[in-house]
């Protein structure tokens, strides 16, 4: 927008003064007319010009118009006169003269001039046009200048800056950044070599090019001189910006013409070009000089100028580029964490920060691509994306960091959901070109290399006689997943694997594990295509076969050994069937070995022919031929088709046979595993026959049911054990899963529990390969499934009682919740359909309670919730637990959190008690505390309707009531009266339940909709509690009243089973505002009827680890399992459902409510009574972790121990010292430092990704180090050393279903340990920080005891005045000791497998990770402790130190983000800041609010050194706050206030400090506000938000003038700030 609109160019042409002014200039330029005489008249002397112009000026009255016309003519003269030195000098003289009389408005003149020059450059750039030079000969024949009508008079020009920098120049950088918005109209178009078709023209073109280049140089040189003249005056910011953009564009494209023409090869910069370059640099230096600060130097930092490819051999330009690099590096440092290059996701928490760059909806959050790794750009910004990942060079630090992440993922198996969000389909498998993917991604090359690394690692473990079969199984699941989804180029993978294993190291491949691994994926479509249709199929096949090794197992009957022995045969047979052209490479001996499989199958069939077990018919032909099921099986044709063997007819049998999988010996198991790779369909049929081998029986309906429909149920048999299933090929597993689904959901016979259990075991064994989202998957296979009540019930039972942890692990809990909500919504108003509704509602409860991030209650995000009242209430409780114990991870969650609360509150009338609200997080408490309590209104409504309701119910419920009245009541009662049915029944009992007609009441309740029954329960509880209060006022005994109330409720629950107990208990605990409610709950839970019910459930259910159970499951009778109310019209039998199991989500909530009401003894008693039941809780580990965090600081020690005992302590990796400490006689004493150090070492060994010094050396450089990592079951104690028990191995998912991965289990166990310690958070944090502050010296001491002193400890510091990491005084605030006392350092370093340098960094990261998982109470203590140690550091408090030494020390400790990782260079302050950065990086977004506390404790800041520390601490936070505007503003304001402490108007430092000393902080502030304005990495078009500019402007008013001057552009004044002057909002609304 032009701030100074001017008349159109046509108005200038018609102005009467125009011709006179043109004549005047022509006269002085010597171009008035063409003269041939040698003694022509010379132009007047320059000094005469001003007098002549004055005479002309006096002839016109409108001086403004005259000035505009004069400017227009001057601009039109610049181009033709630029190549003529005397004329150019006169123009400069004329400009200065006119300036002296105020006749040039530079703010309009310079933009118009630049626009004119740009147009001229475009014209000059037209290769074949006649305009190849501009000189005096270009004047018109009449001697007049060209018409000024071609000159633009308003500044609309925006310079072009191509997409520089390039990755090849500077590694990783921001996405194509330029100084200004690109404008294609200004792109230069030089002559291209392709335009020259004839070599004879080249010499002509070279001459023309030289003339053209010289012309442009002269034009730019003159333009720069004019600008330099103008810069002597005060111009508007928008003018400065215009000039700056043009200068940058000229510099960046200085050689564009030469690069794009053939003459470039012989071209060298000439004098004219160097001159204009220098003039251009002069302009830029004047614009950015600190004295004037016309343009912030920061604009050069984001310009990309330093990345021009062809830097001319010019010292002046090189000096500027070096200065840009220096200041850019300094500024970028503030954005990066210390040890940035070591930061890597641990997968110890489910949360992977998405680092989104724009505000998005809640639903979109679920589909984001994760950002597990952030690569720092040259500006220090975190960057991610496919184009960025592709630019990372193999072997670079960033490549190694990416591989470190992938290797760790392959070991720790995060969910497929994580993999899908970070991976891309390999380029060779993309069906159509697609743009680069946003979000952090890994390239297929990275995945390929990391996968091979993992194979090598497992081979080394295998070769060292370590049984790592479990690791191979887990890896094969992920490998299958990656290959099936096209994330690895199979042909490329085989090529690289052969190089690594065979050509690289001949000794590493000694077993057939690689052949087995490839056999797992050989039926994947992409692999089959590579072996059949790829041009390199022959070579690939030959390489695959070369992996075969003869098995030399010491135990030939071991199933694994048998499988590995036969797997090459399986592979050969499969390849034989795929492609006839590759058969020449096959090993005939291995093909013949296939007969042994067939022979075993024939003998096994004969042996079992007469038994109750049978096996599906199989022949050699079946082994090698036919296509069945999913894909083709074996070789097409028959065994005899090879010409070497023939079919043995004796192998053929008839009929069905089955195998007794319970009694199979090891050899039979191994052979059946082999069979699963060669004959998947027969093997599948055999397995399915096993489940029907016991036959079927008719289900006899209950006596209350009259039905002619026959229901057949499979008789029970033992499920297949995990040990057998684990060896099946993944192809067989997939077939089994599909075939089992046919039997489960579309079969005519009700399946056995064994079949259902085996199906779920399959899904648990291979969570990556076999997972399916059941509702969408089954709806596609069986469109009518939801219309079949039995199938719906079975799906809900499987999900609720078997697969809940799997869905949470997969990240599909929310999706499942939305699917189940639809069922709940459809059934809640449907009369009589209670069983399916209550099961779906219970599943929904469990799903909501399992979520660990805020969520939307509706997938679409709009309208009131479809939840029931019960689910609404549980949602609020879940949110309170999530926010308080885990925080809100993303800024994007905050906007829809308020919307979600509004959706819930729109349909829920409940108000929470004050005792509950006091434990709510403040965010939720503030939203809830203002709600009006409507309980009194509910009682009033009851009192108004009581007479009518009692009258109706008297007729209905009295023992002599007329049965026919039931239909009258159902048909004619008002809906608002029906909700009082149960309440009226309670009133009519008068303590004698026998008075009630149970049959009538049961019939009515069954006919009600589930929603009406729920409403009855909540209303009954309100009326019952009100009635107790009324009776107390009449003098009745409280004990009697409570006893009667419990008897009445027992009538509903136990005696007649009319109401669901779980909903009743939830209704009662939600009324904890009434002191009697919880007493009734305790009484009900104490009832023997319930105790017996729970005991019976536990006996029938068997072990909580159902996947390990090998016996036959016992099916519970439907009525006994669910009670009369839910089973009255049902015939479909139960599998896992039970009324006691419905209490699993309820008991924990009862405990929460008791603790909130200070009833800790009762909570202890409830946990003791129901500990056996809670063992079946699918997420009991999470429950323990969350309840300890939610009530941290409020739990007595006895209750804490009781909560811990809910867990199976022997299977949780608690440290031995923790269990000893908790059982000691005096646990209130803080554990020694050795305990905390060992805890951190356990996290380093099991959670933090290993550091790989070489990508080809496996874990931590070698697997020999891997054996030193801690055992999985115990964190190593100080006295423990030596190798890990290898049998512990990697855990499968089914072994760590809660919390999901072993890394999560180890981290969360450490959290539970810390939360359980009966000592204040102050002592715990102090101990952890003390370890970290002195970590290097402690580890060096430990290492010295074994290996002698490391080189250079405390010696040879590059900065002798800086504290050296090895010196005793650098690592201690008190200069007293170099290491921490209380840590048993014996073998501490060697136990980790790391060097001191590596271990110190990883321990700091582990400590930061651990602290970030703890509640905010610990965070406050961390901030206090860290600020105290920083302030007390001796080299900040030592008055004898000079400021130079102080700044040097700070720079030494904090300047280089990778410096802390160097040997013996870390300082106490460096360690603290590194700890804070590691802590911040793992902290959820909401909890970042508390980070300001550390700066508040550091204030007042009195030195530049302390100011730098404050900026260094908070700097890396700012990228995470780019979308959290309020928090960003607070953080920025805090940093500006610390600057005011040091450089304020009223501050009086002991030694004056120049403003230039904090230039990097000034640059960083500019960058931070641009980053936040963009909401991500700074682009050319990035602009600060007006609110941020206003904030900076207010803060700068308190600064010293010299500092204020450097921040002058960070304000909203369009007359002083280039950002304000070019900001559309501020220009339009300057007020």
Image (cartoon, rainbow, N blue to C red):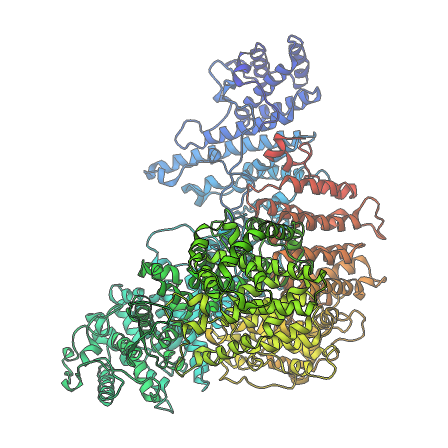
264 and 8: which one is in front? 8
Query: Dividing the picture into quarters, in which one does residue 351 lie?
Result: bottom right
Q: Is residue 976 visible?
A: yes
Q: Quadrant of the N terminus?
A: top right
Residue 91, image x, y percentages: 61, 23
1385 and 105: which one is in front? 1385
Residue 903, image x, y percentages: 54, 49
Residue 920 in the image: above or below residue 608: above
Query: Dividing the picture into quarters, in which one does residue 1220 lie?
Result: bottom right
1525 and 15: which one is in front? 1525
Residue 250 in the image: above or below residue 1205: above
Residue 823 in the image: above or below residue 605: above
Q: Residue furthest front?
A: 960
In the rendered picture of this protein, how many numbered marks are placed on residues?
0
Left or right relative to 286: residue 1059? left
- Which residue is drawn at the image coordinates 56% and 33% (left, top)? 220
326 and 1098: which one is in front? 1098
Left or right relative to 1621: residue 10? left
């Amino acid at each position: 927008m032009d701030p100074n609109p001017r008349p159109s160019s046509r108005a200038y042409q018609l102005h009467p003064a125009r011709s006179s002014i043109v004549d005047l200039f022509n006269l002085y330029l010597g171009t008035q007319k063409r003269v041939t005489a040698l003694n022509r008249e010379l132009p007047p002397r320059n000094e005469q010009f001003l007098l002549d112009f004055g005479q002309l000026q006096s002839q016109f009255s409108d001086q403004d118009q005259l000035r505009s016309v004069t400017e227009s003519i001057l601009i039109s003269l610049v181009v033709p006169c630029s190549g003529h030195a005397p004329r150019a000098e006169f123009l400069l003289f004329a400009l200065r003269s006119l300036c002296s009389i105020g006749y040039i408005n530079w703010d309009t003149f310079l933009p118009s001039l630049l626009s004119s020059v740009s147009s001229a450059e475009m014209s000059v750039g037209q290769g074949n046009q006649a305009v190849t030079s501009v000189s005096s000969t270009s004047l018109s024949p009449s001697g007049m200048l060209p018409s000024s009508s071609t000159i633009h008079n308003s500044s609309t020009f925006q310079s072009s800056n191509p997409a520089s920098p390039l990755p090849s120049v500077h590694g990783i950088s921001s996405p194509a950044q330029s100084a200004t918005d690109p404008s294609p109209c200004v792109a230069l178009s030089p002559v291209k070599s392709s335009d020259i078709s004839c070599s004879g023209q080249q010499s002509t073109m070279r001459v023309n090019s030289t003339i053209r280049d010289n012309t442009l140089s002269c034009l730019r040189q003159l333009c720069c001189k004019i600008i330099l003249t103008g810069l002597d005056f005060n111009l508007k910011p928008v003018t400065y910006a215009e000039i700056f953009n043009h200068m940058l564009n000229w510099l960046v494209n200085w050689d564009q013409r030469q690069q794009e023409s053939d003459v470039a090869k012989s071209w060298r910069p000439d004098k004219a070009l160097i001159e204009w370059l220098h003039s251009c640099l002069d302009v830029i230096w004047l614009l950015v000089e600190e004295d004037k600060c016309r343009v912030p130097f920061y604009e050069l930092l984001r310009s990309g100028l330093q990345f021009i490819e062809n830097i001319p051999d010019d010292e002046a330009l090189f000096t500027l580029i070096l200065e840009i690099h220096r200041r850019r590096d300094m500024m970028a440092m503030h954005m990066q964490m210390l040890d940035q290059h070591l930061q890597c996701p641990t997968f110890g928490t489910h949360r992977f920060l998405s680092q989104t760059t724009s505000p998005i909806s809640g639903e979109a959050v679920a589909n984001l691509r994760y950002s597990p790794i952030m690569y720092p750009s040259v500006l220090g910004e975190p960057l991610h994306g496919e184009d960025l990942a592709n630019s990372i060079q193999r072997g670079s630090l960033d490549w190694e960091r990416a591989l470190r992440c992938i290797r760790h993922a392959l070991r720790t198996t995060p969910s497929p959901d994580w993999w899908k969000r970070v991976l891309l389909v390999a380029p060779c498998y993309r069906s159509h070109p697609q743009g680069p993917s946003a979000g952090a991604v890994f390239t297929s090359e990275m995945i390929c290399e990391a996968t091979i690394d993992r194979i090598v690692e497992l081979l080394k473990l295998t070769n060292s006689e370590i049984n790592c079969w479990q690791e191979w199984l887990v890896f094969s699941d992920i490998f299958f997943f990656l290959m099936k989804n096209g994330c690895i180029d199979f042909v490329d993978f085989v090529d690289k694997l052969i190089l690594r294993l065979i050509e690289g190291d001949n000794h590493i491949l000694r077993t057939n594990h690689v052949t087995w691994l490839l056999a797992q994926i050989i039926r994947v479509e992409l692999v089959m295509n590579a072996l059949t249709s790829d041009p390199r199929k022959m070579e690939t096949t030959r390489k695959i076969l070369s992996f075969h090794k003869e098995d030399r197992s010491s135990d030939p009957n071991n199933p694994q050994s048998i499988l590995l022995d036969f797997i090459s045969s399986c592979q050969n047979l499969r390849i034989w069937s795929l492609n006839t052209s590759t058969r020449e490479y096959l090993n005939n001996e291995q093909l013949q070995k296939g007969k042994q499989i067939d022979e075993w199958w024939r003998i096994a069939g004969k042996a079992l022919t007469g038994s109750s077990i049978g096996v599906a018919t199989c022949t050699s032909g079946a082994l090698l031929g036919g296509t069945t099921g999913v894909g083709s099986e074996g070789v097409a044709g028959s065994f005899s088709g090879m010409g070497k063997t023939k079919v043995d007819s004796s192998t053929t049998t008839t009929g069905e046979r089955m195998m007794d999988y319970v009694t199979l010996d090891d050899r039979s198991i191994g052979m059946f595993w082999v069979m699963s790779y060669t004959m998947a369909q027969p093997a599948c049929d055999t397995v399915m026959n096993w489940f029907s081998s016991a036959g079927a029986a008719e289900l006899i309906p209950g006596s209350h049911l009259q039905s002619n429909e026959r229901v057949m149920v499979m008789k029970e048999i033992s499920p297949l054990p995990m040990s057998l299933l684990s060896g099946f090929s993944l192809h067989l597993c997939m077939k089994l899963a599909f075939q089992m689904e046919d039997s489960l959901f579309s079969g005519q016979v009700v399946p056995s529990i064994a079949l259902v259990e085996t199906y779920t075991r399959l899904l648990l064994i291979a969570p990556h390969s076999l997972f399916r989202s059941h509702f969408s998957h089954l709806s596609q296979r069986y469109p009518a499934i939801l219309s079949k009540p039995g199938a719906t019930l079975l799906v809900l039972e499987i999900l609720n009682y078997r697969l809940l942890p799997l869905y949470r692990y997969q990240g599909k809990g929310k999706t499942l919740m939305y699917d189940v909500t639809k069922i709940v919504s459809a059934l809640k108003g449907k009369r009589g359909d209670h069983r399916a509704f209550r099961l779906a509602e219970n599943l929904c409860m469990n799903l909501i309670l399992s979520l660990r991030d805020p969520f939307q209650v509706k997938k679409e995000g709009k309208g009131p919730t479809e939840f029931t009242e019960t689910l609404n209430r549980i949602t609020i409780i879940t949110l309170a637990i999530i926010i308080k114990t885990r925080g809100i991870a993303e800024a994007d969650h905050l906007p829809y959190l308020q919307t979600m609360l509004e959706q819930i509150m729109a349909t829920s009338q409940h108000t929470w008690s004050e005792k509950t609200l006091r434990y709510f997080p403040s965010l939720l408490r503030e939203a809830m505390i203002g709600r009006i309590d409507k309980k009194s209104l509910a009682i009033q409504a009851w009192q108004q309707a009581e007479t009518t309701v009692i009258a109706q119910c008297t007729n209905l419920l009295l023992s002599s009531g007329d049965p026919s009245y039931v239909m009258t009541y159902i048909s004619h009662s008002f809906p608002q009266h029906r909700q009082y049915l149960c309440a009226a029944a309670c009133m009519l009992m008068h303590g004698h339940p026998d008075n009630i007609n149970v049959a009538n009441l049961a019939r009515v309740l069954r006919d009600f909709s589930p929603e009406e029954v729920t409403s009855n329960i909540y209303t009954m509880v309100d009326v019952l509690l009100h009635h107790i209060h009324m009776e107390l006022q009449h003098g009745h005994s409280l004990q009697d009243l409570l006893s009667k109330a419990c008897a009445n409720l027992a009538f509903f629950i136990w005696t007649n089973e009319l109401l669901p107990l779980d909903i009743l208990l939830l209704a009662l605990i939600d009324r904890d505002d009434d002191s009697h409610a919880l007493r009734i709950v305790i009484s009900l839970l104490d009832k023997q009827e319930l105790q017996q019910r729970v005991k019976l459930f536990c006996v029938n259910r068997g072990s909580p680890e159902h996947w390990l159970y090998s016996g036959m499951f016992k099916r519970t009778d439907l009525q006994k399992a669910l009670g009369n109310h839910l089973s009255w019209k049902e015939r479909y039998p139960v599998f896992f459902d039970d009324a006691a199991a419905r209490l699993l989500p309820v008991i924990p909530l009862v405990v929460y409510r008791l603790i909130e009401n200070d009833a800790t003894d009762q909570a202890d008693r409830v946990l003791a009574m129901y500990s056996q039941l809670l063992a079946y809780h699918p997420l009991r580990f999470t429950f323990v972790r969350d309840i300890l965090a939610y009530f941290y600081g409020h739990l007595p020690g006895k209750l804490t121990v009781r909560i811990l005992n809910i867990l199976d302590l022997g299977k949780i990796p608690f440290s031995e010292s923790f269990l000893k400490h908790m059982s000691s006689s005096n646990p209130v004493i803080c554990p020694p430092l050795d305990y905390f150090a060992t805890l951190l070492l356990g996290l380093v060994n099991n959670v933090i990704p290993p550091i790989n010094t070489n990508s080809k050396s496996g874990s931590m450089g070698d697997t020999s180090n891997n054996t030193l990592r801690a055992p999985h079951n115990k964190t190593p104690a100080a006295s423990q050393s030596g190798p890990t028990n290898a049998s512990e191995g990697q855990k499968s998912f089914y072994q760590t279903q809660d919390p999901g991965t072993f890394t999560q289990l180890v981290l969360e166990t450490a959290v539970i340990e810390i939360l359980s310690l009966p000592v204040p958070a102050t002592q715990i944090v102090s101990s952890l920080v003390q370890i970290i502050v002195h970590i290097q010296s402690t580890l060096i001491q430990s290492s010295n005891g074994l290996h002698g002193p490391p080189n250079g400890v405390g010696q040879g510091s590059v900065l002798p005045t800086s504290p050296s990491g090895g010196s005793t005084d650098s690592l201690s605030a008190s200069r007293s000791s170099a290491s921490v006392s209380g840590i048993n350092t014996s073998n501490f370093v060697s136990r980790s497998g790391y060097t001191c340098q590596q271990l110190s960094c990883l321990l700091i990261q582990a400590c930061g990770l651990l602290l970030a998982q703890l509640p905010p109470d610990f965070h406050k203590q961390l901030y206090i402790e860290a600020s105290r140690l920083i302030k007390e550091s001796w080299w900040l408090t030592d008055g004898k130190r000079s400021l130079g030494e102080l700044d040097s020390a700070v720079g030494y400790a904090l300047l280089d983000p990778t410096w802390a990782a160097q040997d013996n260079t870390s300082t106490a302050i460096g360690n603290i800041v590194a700890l804070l950065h590691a802590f911040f990086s793992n902290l959820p977004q909401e909890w970042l609010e508390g980070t300001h506390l550390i700066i508040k404790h550091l204030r007042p800041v009195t030195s530049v050194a302390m100011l730098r520390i404050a900026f260094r601490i908070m700097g890396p936070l700012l990228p995470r706050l780019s979308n959290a505007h309020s928090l960003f503003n607070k953080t920025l304001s805090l940093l500006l206030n610390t600057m005011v402490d040091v450089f304020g108007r009223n501050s009086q430092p002991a030694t004056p400090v120049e403003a230039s000393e904090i230039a990097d902080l000034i640059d960083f502030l500019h960058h931070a506000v641009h980053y936040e304005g963009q909401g991500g990495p700074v682009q050319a078009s990035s602009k600060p938000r007006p609110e941020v500019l206003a904030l900076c402007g207010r803060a700068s008013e308190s600064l010293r003038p010299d500092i204020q001057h450097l921040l002058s552009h960070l304000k909203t004044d369009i007359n002083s700030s280039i950002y304000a002057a070019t900001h559309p909002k501020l220009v339009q609304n300057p007020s």
